[in-house]
Image: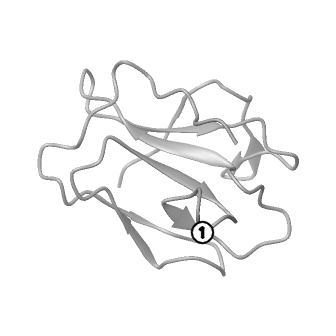
Amino acid sequence: MSAPNIPSWAGPPPDNEFELKNKLSSGPETIKFNERSHLIVGRSSSDATVTIASTTASRVHALIVHNVEDGQVYVIDLKSAHGTHIDGNRISADKPMALKIN
């Protein structure tokens, strides 16, 4: 498996403790960057930073990336078989989609 392309604007959040709440029934309850610029989400414990136990998840499914230029966090689908959905809407593969931060 080749490594995903990480955008040039990726970098760790300033507080390094940025947390995302996981709304899925599988995987960790919170997701922390811990000084990383990005997280790889997928089924594979050897390839993914955040593993989810779902038959609809690809081995390497999506990236969660912090943008140092605008401070936003983005999800990028890595051409997964079943797609990545935000608020019930499928996002385009390889196109960063900003997450709503509450």
Q: Secondary structure at mark 1?
A: loop
* Residue where numbered disc 1 is placed: 45
Q: Quadrant of the C terminus?
A: bottom left
Q: How many numbered marks have been drawn onto this rendered protein structure?
A: 1
Residue 17 place in picture, x, y as percent = 20, 60
Coloring scheme of the render? one colour
Amino acid, disc 1: Ser
Is residue 102 depicted above or below 76 in this figure? below
Residue 8 place in picture, x, y as percent = 37, 18
Is residue 77 depicted above or below 6 in this figure? below
Residue 76 place in picture, x, y as percent = 59, 36
Q: Nearer the viewer, residue 90 or 54?
A: 54
Residue at 37% from the left image edge and 49% from the top image edge: 101
Q: Is residue 18 left or right of residue 62?
A: left
Which image quadrant for residue 32? bottom left
Residue at 51% from the left image edge and 64% from the top image edge: 50
Dot 1 alpha-carbon crowd within 10 angstroms: few under 14, some 14 to 19, many 20 or more: some
Q: Quadrant of the N terminus?
A: top right
Is residue 52 depicted above or below 14 in this figure? below
Residue 54 place in picture, x, y as percent = 77, 72
Q: Nearer the viewer, residue 21 or 102?
A: 21
Q: Is residue 76 left or right of residue 70?
A: right
Residue at 54% from the left image edge and 26% from the top image edge: 5
Q: Which residue is situated farthest in the left direction here?
A: 15
Q: Is residue 12 left or right of residue 7?
A: left
